[in-house]
Image (spheres, helix red, strand yellow):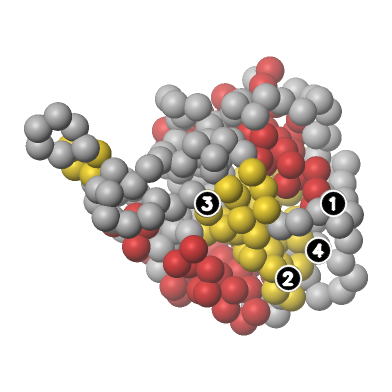
Amino acid sequence: QPGPQLEKLFATGLASLGDKSVDHVISDPPYSAHTHEKVWVAKTVGRPTVYDGIDFAHLEDAHAYSVAAQAARVAKRWIIFFTDTEGVSLRRSAVIAAGLDYVRTCAWVKPDATPQMSGDRPASAFESFVLAHAPGRKRWNGGGKRNVYTHTRAPGGAPHPTTKPLSLMRELVEDFTDENDTILDPFAGSGTTGVAAIQLGRHFIGWERDANYHAIATRRLRGDEARPNPAQPSLFGGAA
């Protein structure tokens, strides 16, 4: 069950960080029950093939508030939480309750999003992220850029079921953070946020409760993939 594991994260992980000890939080926590528990149907010859939803637990509402409160405590500047569209209201309420400034909801548009195989409704072609900031002056590197980020999904065979493409995470790191800043991701998956951070000359702190994904993230962060690399990678590169 996710409850005790998350409480351990709060008690022994995030609690070990001092107040305002990182510059930013960029994270992709588990989404709502709507996304995690829905059934995926693919049309095949003969009977449709049915797939279960995401194979790890969704985040409870209370934990969303706890995560936001910890982010508000430790971060000096920007906080980014990815979410499904159905979870935007919860994430927005959580960051406001934590005393953060809610700034905007942004979109990651996926040109290669999976079609709606059942054919009875439109497919979802984007995911959202809620953008917040610690109280105080806001600054970013994007100028007059709009809040829509367009990147194809990470390639097949990615080591995590909710992968984010490396190109997307690099763009966010470049837009919202500066060289030598420290970025925290308490739901690190297989480490793509950390890879993007290190490639662009930032520091990274992350946690991941699943031993398999933790091992993958550790290998990636210690390997050649995470060497400083200011050049923009292929839009098809990376995995979360």
> Hey, what amino acid is under mark 4?
Lys
Q: Residues within 10 Å of mark 3 (few under 14, many from 20)?
A: some
Kindly identify which numbered label has been placed on residue 126.
3
- Residue occupying image coordinates x 71% and y 25%: 233
**Disc with the residue nearer the chain's start (2 vs 3):** 2
**Spatial distance from mark 3 to mark 1, Cα to Cα?**
21 Å
- Residue that appears at 72% across and 38% down: 170
Tell me the CA gap for discs 2 and 1: 14 Å
Q: What residue is shown with label 4?
A: 76
Q: Identify which amino acid the numbered label 3 is placed on.
A: Phe
The residue closer to the viewer here, 63 or 116, is 116
Q: Give the residue pinned by disc 1.
A: 142
User: Where does label 2 land, which residue?
Assistant: 103
Q: Amino acid at mark 2?
A: Val
* Separation of marks 4 and 3 at Cα, in angstroms: 29 Å
Look at the image and tell me in which quarter the C terminus lies.
Answer: top right
Label 4 crowd (10 A; few <14 / some 14-19 / many >=20): many
Q: Nearer the viewer, mark 2 or mark 3?
A: 3
Residue appearing at x 66%, y 40% in the figure: 168
Q: Quadrant of the N terminus?
A: bottom left
82 above or below 96? above
Q: Is residue 49 visible?
A: yes
x and y percentages locating residue 80 in the rendered image = 66, 58
Disc 3 is placed on an element classified as strand
Q: CA separation, marks 2 and 3?
A: 19 Å
Q: Earlier in the sequence, mark 4 or mark 3?
A: 4
